[in-house]
């Protein structure tokens, strides 16, 4: 591959509900495309300012309500996109599929990619803001509409292979959302030795109400058996932060959403990374908990819920088995017991986190996925150089 395989190619990354500075959209895909020589513009909501790597950002107003997001927001974004000449338009939200026919008329000759982040029909099944009958009736309809509209795009990209296989498009690719090499480098720079880390455990990322309750109970069990236990919960949305503060798990520090560049600092200050997905909802069958790989990159031992895609990946590397606890479903007591066992091993000087970091840095890096993305782009625009 040449050093600038996408030289002369103009790319528009569009999102109607994510921040323009979302780390998959800007820090991984946008940055990788720009390094490959493409001229990159991101259209989306933006609260942190423009990129520092030459990527242009067009700010879109945020949707004011859920219905506004799905009905009006795509057309507002489409109107803003009219000012951009693009060889490739890369869509990051299912609601943007409704404007694909219009994009084809407005941007003649442009190739259109649909990037699938989640199993959207199955998410509808668990949304608590929808009436109960919608959980049964809507997923099938949403599935048919999404797949039908996706037939209008030139390629589908998804975050896991099962998600990509949902679609019948001839051109499709799975790009795992692994941390980039600079994340590994930054994590190694700022991470402390296990004995010097302030927290025994960290949980990173969003939580549902039910999972937050499960996590709080797990932490309470650990604290009863190890009174000196300390934990950091970071990256949760405001209502979950308030919920956890009301529960007040002992020995626990609770934070809200943090910028992505602060994640290595937080993870590198904890001995164990925890992921709790104990409830087997259908959307998890095709999901992959990215935080597990961010924990590994930061030299944390890991306790995590089992998911099919994660289990398949981990089974490919026997080195990971002894340094990671994977629990299928489970009760709070099982997670607590695994965390306590891991802490005892860390106290004895075992280097599970370092072994996980080395293994992950060899296999689970975004740049390997970026090569597949750039190859797909080259095929679409026929710029084989």
Image (cartoon, rainbow, N blue to C red):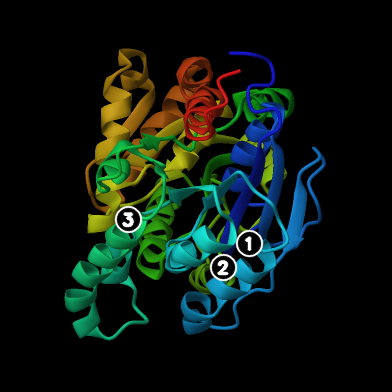
Numbered tag placed on residue 256 in the rendering: 1
Q: Residue drawn 52% across and 15% down?
A: 358
Q: Where 177 sits versus 118, above or below?
A: above
Visible in this render: residue 300?
A: no
The part of the image, by quadrant, that contains residue 175 is top left
Q: Is residue 9 left or right of residue 50?
A: left
Q: Is residue 307 left or right of residue 206?
A: left
Residue 360: horizontal and vertical position, in percent?
Answer: 48, 21
* Label 2 vs 1, first from the N-terminus: 2
Label 3 belongs to which residue? 119
Could you give the CA–CA distance between mark 2 and mark 1, rounded to whole angstroms?
6 Å
The part of the image, by quadrant, that contains residue 328 is top left
Could you give the CA–CA distance between mark 3 and mark 2, rounded to whole angstroms?
26 Å
Quick one: SS at disc 3?
A: loop
Callout 1: few (<14), some (14-19), or many (20+) C-alpha neighbours within 10 Å?
A: some
Residue 298: horizontal and vertical position, in percent?
Answer: 59, 29
Residue in the foreground of this view, choosing between 375 and 70: 375
Q: Residue drawn 30% across and 44% down?
A: 169
Observer-side mark, 3 or 1, equals 3
Residue 140: horizontal and vertical position, in percent?
Answer: 19, 68
The reply to whether the C-beta atoms of the residues labelled 2 and 1 are less than 8 Å apart is yes
* Label 3 vs 2, first from the N-terminus: 3
Q: Residue drawn 50% across and 31% down?
A: 373
Q: Where 127 sits versus 280, above or below?
A: below
Label 2 belongs to which residue? 241
Quick one: SS at disc 1?
A: loop
């Amino acid at each position: 591959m040449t050093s600038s395989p996408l030289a002369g190619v103009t790319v528009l990354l569009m999102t109607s509900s994510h921040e323009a500075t979302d780390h998959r959209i800007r820090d991984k895909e946008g940055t990788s495309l720009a390094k490959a020589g493409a001229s990159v513009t991101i259209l989306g909501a933006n609260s942190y300012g423009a990129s520092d790597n030459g990527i242009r950002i067009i700010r879109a107003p945020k949707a004011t309500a859920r219905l506004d997001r799905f009905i009006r927001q795509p057309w507002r974004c489409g109107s803003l996109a009219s000012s951009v000449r693009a060889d490739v338009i890369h869509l990051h939200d299912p609601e943007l599929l409704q404007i694909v026919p219009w994009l084809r008329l407005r941007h003649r000759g442009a190739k259109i990619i649909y990037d699938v982040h989640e199993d959207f029909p199955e998410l509808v099944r668990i949304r608590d803001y929808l009436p109960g009958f919608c959980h049964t009736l809507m997923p099938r309809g949403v599935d048919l509409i999404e797949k039908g509209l996706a037939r209008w795009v030139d390629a589908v990209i998804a975050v896991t292979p099962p998600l990509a296989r949902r679609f019948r498009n001839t051109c499709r690719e799975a790009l795992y959302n692994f941390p980039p090499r600079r994340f590994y480098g930054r994590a190694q720079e700022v991470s402390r030795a296990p004995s010097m880390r302030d927290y025994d455990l960290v949980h990173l990322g969003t939580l549902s109400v039910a999972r937050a309750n499960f996590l709080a109970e797990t932490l309470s069990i650990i604290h009863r058996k190890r009174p000196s236990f300390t934990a950091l919960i970071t990256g949760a949305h405001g209502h979950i932060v308030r919920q956890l503060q009301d529960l007040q798990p002992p020995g626990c520090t609770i934070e809200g959403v943090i910028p992505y560049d602060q994640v290595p600092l937080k993870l590198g200050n904890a001995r164990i990374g925890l992921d709790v997905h104990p409830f087997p909802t259908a959307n998890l069958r095709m999901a992959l908990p990215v935080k597990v790989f961010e924990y590994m990159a930061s030299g944390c031992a890991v306790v995590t819920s089992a998911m099919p895609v994660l289990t398949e990946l981990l089974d490919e590397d026997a080195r990971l088995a002894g340094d990671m606890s994977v629990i299928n479903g489970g009760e709070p007591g099982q997670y607590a017991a695994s965390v306590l066992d891991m802490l005892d091993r860390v106290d004895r000087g075992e280097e599970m986190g370092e072994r996980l970091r080395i293994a992950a840095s060899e296999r689970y890096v975004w740049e390997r996925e970026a090569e597949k993305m750039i190859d797909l782009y080259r095929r679409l625009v026929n710029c084989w150089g």
